[in-house]
């Protein structure tokens, strides 16, 4: 089974989000970068499926040259090939253009399954997987918390829970499935995996200049951190000496009678 | 010009997230168009009273699609939107343009992404505010990073496809009820549109009790091990609540992901969140900022969870929690 996994390089924001002076991007001078937890799980799921059915896992990212770092991280987890569709530094590519670029890579291979995250953790567009599926003419399922591929490898069952109900979707292969964290527990990269990833080749291709003309324009003008209500925590005390005060607060909040 | 709103049902009622979508959708109607209203689209039995109260002038009741089939639902919306969506570039009028609005739920986001792919239109997920900016354009504000960051944007498209964040726009009935005139339509969809459809079964692993619990006792890396959760579970039981955890806890395999609170876990809205050994990363706050009160227990008084809580106890949770459990047991 040939599997393609799409991963996006995003900043790892920890305690707070700081913006650049023009408020058009996150200030990443002090932050690291990673792929989203959903996508880590997509890579893990792909590696497990390839282990069971044979075949290889290819990872693809649309992003700046530095996204090679994230692709190598995926190689260390067991992917065997990586493709970087390189964009100019600092450029933000919208979901439609992203899907088109990923489509060019997907269509050039012979994949049975394409996995993505349900949503990118930074922009949260909730659509690249579905747009990619339409470009390929393949069926799609989203938000999967479990994927079961039939023994014959011809179809799969993708399921999730929604409003307390389990929804199961059966899809013939080839298909596109977007997944959510929790579908599996991703492994840590092994030392041999990391060494292999260091030496592996990452194929770089430039992003196509003439994408499809979209039927509309969506343009970010500015980013803004919402105001958090500023609270001043009341310190109830140190260690178990704080317990009587803690009990009093629980009673005051009506949590205990 | 019509503003369509895909309405989801929760049992016999309009889903809360769809009430929010209807509220935002109404704001897209031009004030001048007297008697105009939102056109609700429902796959199922329409709760007409609620729809009228939320300003639905028309209610399109769709038959011919059995259950949830995202691409088929999108195809129906594309049919209703009609040729309006196809006029690109120069064909656009300067006046108000049609829109399709849905809730920012798994279903709403999924159906609108399909609609975006079918029509070639941009889709903006999880909007929190929208207003006309002249020339048929829309100014909108949408959530990034699960609401930790807001994006201001301009949408210039023949039709607007928007979903509405489930936790930002407060549901508000219309000042004047809509007529809620029912139009029965049958779906014109292909077999390919119906290929992917949900087969539903009850229950399964879900974050339901965590999402709705009145008290959540949270545990993070500071708990130290799977076994370390014993006092948290005991306390949760005493308080009639449940245990929630940080991502470190699920990554370590100490507890399953269904218990994770945060951006990629469950959003909780308890009366009390008692966060123990959790630093308070913003992705964790994305899931617990809806808590009415937060008490933090942490060895580090400067951890963000400690400074953003209502009450803080500086100390080792393995000392404080057993003492608290004992004190609560001694009370009765
Ligand atoms: C895209 C993305 C999505 C994410 N989604 C989520 C999410 O959904 N949920 C989530 O939780 N995280 C999420 N994270 C991870 C998040 O950034 C943090 O890494 C995580 O929340 C930290 O967990 P923690 O607070 O348990 O651990 P730490 O940050 O390591 O904090 C542990 C805390 O415990 C305290 N402590 C240690 N020992 C004790 C003791 N004995 N008694 C009391 N206190 C003690 C320490 O002082 C410290 O403050 C996400 C990250 C990314 C990049
Ligand atoms: N630049 C990118 N490169 C590779 N994959 C991407 C990129 N952007 C988005 N994706 C994939 O599409 C998913 C959904 O993204 P979005 O629709 O933008 O929220 C992500 O979780 C990724 O798997």
Image: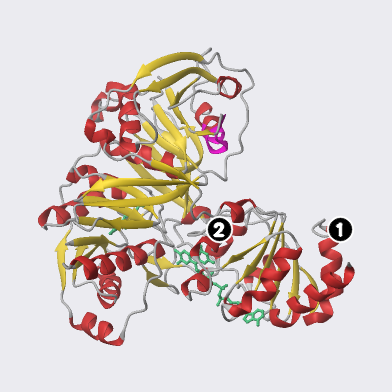
Q: Quadrant of the C terminus of chain B?
A: bottom right
Q: Is residue A94 something that shows in the picture?
A: no
Is disc 1's CB within 8 Å of ligand 1?
no
Cα separation between marks 2 and 1: 30 Å
Q: Which mark is residue B286?
A: 2
Measured along the vertical axis of the image, is residue B94 above or below residue A149?
above
Membership of B111 in magenta stretch: no
Residue sticking out furthest to the front: A151
Q: Quadrant of ligand 2?
A: bottom left
- Magenta segment: B13-21
Residue ID at (21%, 61%): A4
Is disc 2's CB within 8 Å of ligand 1?
yes
Classify residue B324 by image quadrant: bottom right
Measured along the vertical axis of the image, is residue B121 above or below residue B268?
above
Residue sticking out furthest to the right: B331
Kindly report which numbered mark, 2 or 1, lies closer to the viewer in this rendering.
1
Measured along the vertical axis of the image, is residue A214 above or below residue B286?
above
Regarding mark 2 in the picture, which secondary structure is present there? helix
Q: Which residue is the site of mark 1? A: A257
Where residue B18 appears, x then y in whole percent?
A: 52, 34
Q: Are marks 2 and 1 on the same chain?
A: no
Residue ID at (23%, 82%): A198
Q: Quadrant of the N terminus of chain B?
A: top left
Chain bearing tag 1 is A
Residue ID at (82%, 70%): A246
Characterize the local packing of mark 1: few (<14), some (14-19) or many (20 or more) Cα atoms within 10 angstroms: few
For the residue pair A149 and A106, the one nearer the viewer reads as A149
């Amino acid at each position: 089974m040939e599997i393609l996994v799409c991963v996006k390089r995003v900043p790892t924001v920890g305690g707070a989000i700081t913006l650049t002076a023009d408020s058009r991007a996150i200030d990443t001078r002090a932050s690291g970068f990673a792929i989203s937890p959903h996508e880590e799980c997509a890579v893990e799921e792909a590696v497990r499926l390839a282990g069971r059915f044979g075949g290889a896992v290819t990872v693809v990212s649309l992003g700046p040259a530095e996204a090679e770092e994230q692709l190598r991280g995926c190689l260390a987890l067991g992917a065997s090939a990586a493709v970087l569709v390189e964009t100019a530094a600092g450029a933000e590519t919208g979901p439609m253009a992203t899907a088109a670029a990923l489509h060019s890579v997907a269509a050039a291979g012979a994949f049975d399954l394409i996995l993505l995250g349900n949503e990118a953790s930074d922009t949260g567009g909730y659509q690249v997987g579905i747009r990619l599926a339409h470009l390929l003419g393949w069926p799609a399922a989203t938000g999967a918390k479990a994927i079961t591929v039939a023994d014959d490898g011809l179809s799969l069952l993708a399921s999730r829970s929604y409003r307390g109900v389990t929804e199961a979707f059966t899809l013939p292969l080839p298909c596109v499935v977007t997944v959510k964290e929790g579908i599996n527990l991703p492994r840590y990269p092994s030392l041999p995996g990391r060494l292999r990833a260091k030496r592996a080749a990452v194929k770089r291709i430039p992003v196509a200049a003439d994408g499809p003309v979209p039927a509309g324009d969506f343009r970010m003008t500015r980013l803004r951190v919402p105001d958090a209500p500023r609270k001043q925590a009341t310190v109830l005390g140190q260690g178990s000496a704080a317990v009587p005060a803690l009990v009093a607060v629980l009673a005051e909040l009506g949590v205990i009678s | 010009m019509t503003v369509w709103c895909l309405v989801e049902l929760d049992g016999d009622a309009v889903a809360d997230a769809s009430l929010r979508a209807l509220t935002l959708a109404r704001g897209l109607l031009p004030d001048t168009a007297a008697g105009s209203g939102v056109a609700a689209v429902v796959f199922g039995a329409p709760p007409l009273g609620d729809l009228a109260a939320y300003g639905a002038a028309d209610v399109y009741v769709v038959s011919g699609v059995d259950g949830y089939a995202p691409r088929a639902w999108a195809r129906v919306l594309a049919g209703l939107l009609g040729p309006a969506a196809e006029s690109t570039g120069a064909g656009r009028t300067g006046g108000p343009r049609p829109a399709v609005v849905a809730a920012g739920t798994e279903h709403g986001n999924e159906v609108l992404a399909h609609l975006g792919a079918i029509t070639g239109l941009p889709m903006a997920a999880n909007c929190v505010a929208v207003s006309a900016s002249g020339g048929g354009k829309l100014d909108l504000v949408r959530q990034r990073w699960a609401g930790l960051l807001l994006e201001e944007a301009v949408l210039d498209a023949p039709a607007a496809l928007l979903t509405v964040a489930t936790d930002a726009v407060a549901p508000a009935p219309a000042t004047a009820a809509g007529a809620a005139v029912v139009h029965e339509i049958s779906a014109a969809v292909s077999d390919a549109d119906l290929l992917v459809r949900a087969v539903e079964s009850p229950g399964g692993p879900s974050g339901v009790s965590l999402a709705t619990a009145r008290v959540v006792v949270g545990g993070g890396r500071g708990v130290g091990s799977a076994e370390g959760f014993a006092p948290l579970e005991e306390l949760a039981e005493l308080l009639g609540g449940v245990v929630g955890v940080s991502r470190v806890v699920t990554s370590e395999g100490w507890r399953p992901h269904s218990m994770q609170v945060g951006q990629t876990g469950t959003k909780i809205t308890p009366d009390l969140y008692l966060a123990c050994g959790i630093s308070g990363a913003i992705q964790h706050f994305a899931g617990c900022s809806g808590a009415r009160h937060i008490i933090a227990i942490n060895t580090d008084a400067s951890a963000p969870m400690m400074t953003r809580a209502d009450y803080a106890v500086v100390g080792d949770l393995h000392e404080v929690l057993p003492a608290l459990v004992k004190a609560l047991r001694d009370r009765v």
